Image (cartoon, coloured by chain):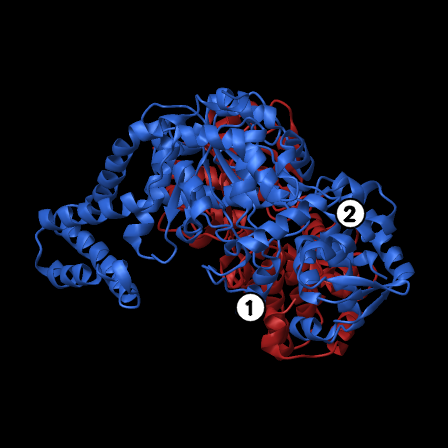
Chain colours: A red, B blue
Amino acid sequence: MTAWGIIGDGKWGLGLARRLHRNGHSVSVGGLVKRRKGIPKGILHTTDVPGLLQAHERLIIALPIGEVETLLQQSEVSLGPQQRVMSTARGLTPMTHLRSTEAIRTLTAVRQLAVLAGAADARSLGDKSPVALVVGSAFPSWSAEIQNALWSNSLRIYTNKDIAGVELSNVAASVVGVALGVARAMNVGPAAEATALTRALAEMNRVVSGLGGQFGTAYGLAGLGVLGEMVYGGQGPSFLAGASLAAGDYQIGQFAEVRESSRTLSARVVRQRIHSPLVEAVESMFAGRLTAKAALAGLMERPVGSETELLIKS
Amino acid sequence: MNSVYAQTMNAPLFQFNRHRDDIEREVISRVVDGFTDYAGDDATRSLQLVLNDAAFHEINRLEKVRGREGQRLDDWKNLARRIGRMTQPELRDELKRRSDWYVKDVVGHFDKRVYRFATSVLPLGLGAVFNTTDFAQGLTQVRDLASRIRVEGDVATLRELAKRGTLVIVPTHSSNLDSIVLGWSLVHAQLPPCTYGAGKNLFLNPLIGYFMRNLGAYRVDRRLRHVLYKDVLKLYSQVLIERGYHSLFFPGGTRSRSGQIEQHLKLGLLGSALSAFTERILRGDDRPIYIVPVTINYPLVLEAETLIEDYLKEEGQARYIIDDDEFSRLGRVVQYSARVMGLQTSMVIRYGQPMDVFGNRVAADGYSRSPGGSIIDPVGYLSVDGQVSADPARDAEYTRQTGAAVADSFLRETVILPTHFLGWLLFERERRLAPHLDLFALLRTTSGDRHDLTELCGDAERVRQLLVAAEERGQLRLDSAIRQSPIDEVLDDAVRTYGMYHLRSAVEYGDDAIIVRDPKTLFYYGNRLSAWDSLLRDGVA
């Protein structure tokens, strides 16, 4: 049995706390609200977040991406070399457009970092539905430790050394997934949807490898896995945001996390000159510069090249 | 006794000869134990594999060489035939014998008298090398030399760190003169002497070989690629660091062929520094190890022509051993040195900010700092639940990250000189003029191209502004001439510098223009700026 500290008492934080506790680990969860309801028995809850960070060698940061930097910039928070951190935050930071583990690396002395990603939503993590997730970490012993701590007959944990690739696949999937939602809502038909899915995958690979991940990681759970969940389930915030854009009733403030991912990712791909028509089209739709119909027309009118060449060339 | 000698005579290297046998024994026993650290049959198999691998490579190599070295061929052939029938103790003995041979081939030597001689005469000697015309002027030349080689960076802090812990100096590598000028800079900065690995071919020059042999250099035979030799070499360098010998190695591996600043570093020796740190901690020795990146910035590179030819010929695949370059021709070295003395622009050796073996910044007090500036104890990186543990996969990733930190430091601490600036500018303009040509076609066709001086100065001024902004952001360093002089003087300095040494001047003046004469040389010097290509391209009209 080992001791784990989890920052964030939302669905992800509590879902992971339950899984760890069930596997016999001692778990403390930190959040802002005192006497928070719904804390499972046996799990310690505290509002002393700095104290909790100080006291644990194994940490999980289960906060929305927008709060990660804020937490670490607090003067009383200091993470040290002996600590190992896993993040579940999806997206890029609002101001600096960094991946969550990049932000942690930039602000703290922690080196052994990991990220948890995949198709499971917070609800399926909390109950006993069978799901699989991937842990990205360049440190095999840390990812193995997470794998062993969380693994059960209803949760499979795969490992991947390409931490940047896993994080980027996850954010890219949530953005290109909007385009798939648009396609479904516009009733383009299965063949056109399949084309959109194929091109989305090609684009994800370009974005991931262009921003420092490895080519191919997007085919894993954090990329294709996430897209598959949207397409099969017809659900998920990205997919629903796409439907809303297609219907023309999207309003500012809706699907905030997806909207933010789109804004930050498109800023980063534009800055690094990565060819990414879907990401840019989604951002234009969100920003109100393009209707769904015009976006589809624009994508169809673009010059067409070789399938494999476009797969690798930025 | 001169003052430098007095300042540095406490350096560990002065005790080297007394401990040499002990060091050899430790390396051999750790090599042998490393391959036998398995139970039963696995140990036998591991010993067989390593000996087999060594025999295979040695037989292949020795079949092609003649002379004394070739006589060892039969011995290896004989071993190859016997390996399968040998018992575990026999295999161990054999491995011990072979390791002993390699260690003795590698191991260095340090002679106090040679060091004392070198530190009092080297500045003069180097002065002589750098200025053959008036050697008799003696002391004047020491001053002249100091004006031709500028040592920058916080060397006072490094002197303090050398007392607290062990320095591992990691410079950029452009020329075989690097170890000589760097050695000079250590003496000049009153830093302790370092041990370092040098290619066996460099020992062929009798004069330089004599000094290297007696000043702590150890021999690296780059022709030997088998596991046993690599292991001996790695452990030798590791044991030296563990025992507190300040060390130096070039993490780029070989001289940069293209002229670019090295970004793909060889991690093996950086890994030795981390392994040495871990080993020390496990033994209860908490003296720190400091990695010190250094950039060596030449306005002219002795071997520029050979290096760039080699780069182009191999299309990036390094010919590891060049033994017929300018360094081996004494005339060229003398000519080069004399010309360098006449230059306006100094060579700059810049000591970067020290870091720990994990790539964290180390402050003047000798303690590691987190990105936020608080003191951290790097031992934490090695511990799980308070226990320090060895974990090769974890350490490989730490080493990769340290390598990235060193590569970043190389960029930040590179000093851009006028020859780099003009080389980049002219080559970029050539690229613009013929965007359809690939590199090789460009290099073949641009000789004779004319660049109007007014236009060139306009581009140069814009690129300079971008460089100044990059320097303010801490991305690189500029020679003060580039920062301050009128732009036509910066270009003029570069044109004259190129003309002073290279057999064929890279450029020459025409009517109100600069004419390209040797695009390869321009490409080579300009490559020093290639890391900032996308940033600087906006400055070219």
Q: Which mark, by number, is residue B516? A: none
**Residue A24 visible at all:** no
Question: A71 or B419, which lies in front?
Answer: B419
Q: Position of residue A230 (x, y in %)?
A: 58, 62
Element type at mark 1: loop
Q: Specify few, some or many for label 1: CA neighbours under 10 Å numbering under 14, 14-19, or 20 or more.
A: few
Name the subunit of mark 2.
B
Q: Nearer the viewer, residue B247 or A112?
A: B247
Considering the numbered disc 2 on the image, is that residue within a helix, a strand or a loop?
helix
Query: Is mark 2 in CB contact (under 8 Å) with mark 1?
Result: no
Label 1 lies in what chain?
A: B
Query: What residue is shown at x 63% (from left), y 73% (from top)?
Result: A310
What amino acid is labelled 1 in the image?
Answer: Glu
Q: Is residue A203 above or below residue B100?
A: below
Residue B327 lies left or right of residue A261; in this view the side is left
Residue A181 visible within the image: yes
Rendered image: mark on residue B467: 2
Figure check: B333 above or below A59: below
| Nearest to viewer (mark 2 / mark 1) | 1
Q: Is residue A161 left or right of residue A223?
A: left
Q: Are marks 2 and 1 on the same chain?
A: yes
Count of marks overlaid on the render: 2
Residue A260 rendering spot, x and y as whole percentages: 71, 49
x then y, percent, for residue A91 = 63, 49
Specify which label sits upstream in the sequence, 2 or 1.
Answer: 1
**Quadrant (top left/top right/bottom left/bottom right) for the C terminus of chain A:** bottom right
**Direction from residue B247 to residue B103 in the image, left or right:** left
Q: In which image quadrant can residue A182 be found?
A: bottom right
Amino acid residing under circle 2? Leu
> Which residue is depicted at the point 19% across and 45% down?
B96
Residue B315, numbered circle: 1
- Give the x, y percent position of residue A102: 59, 43
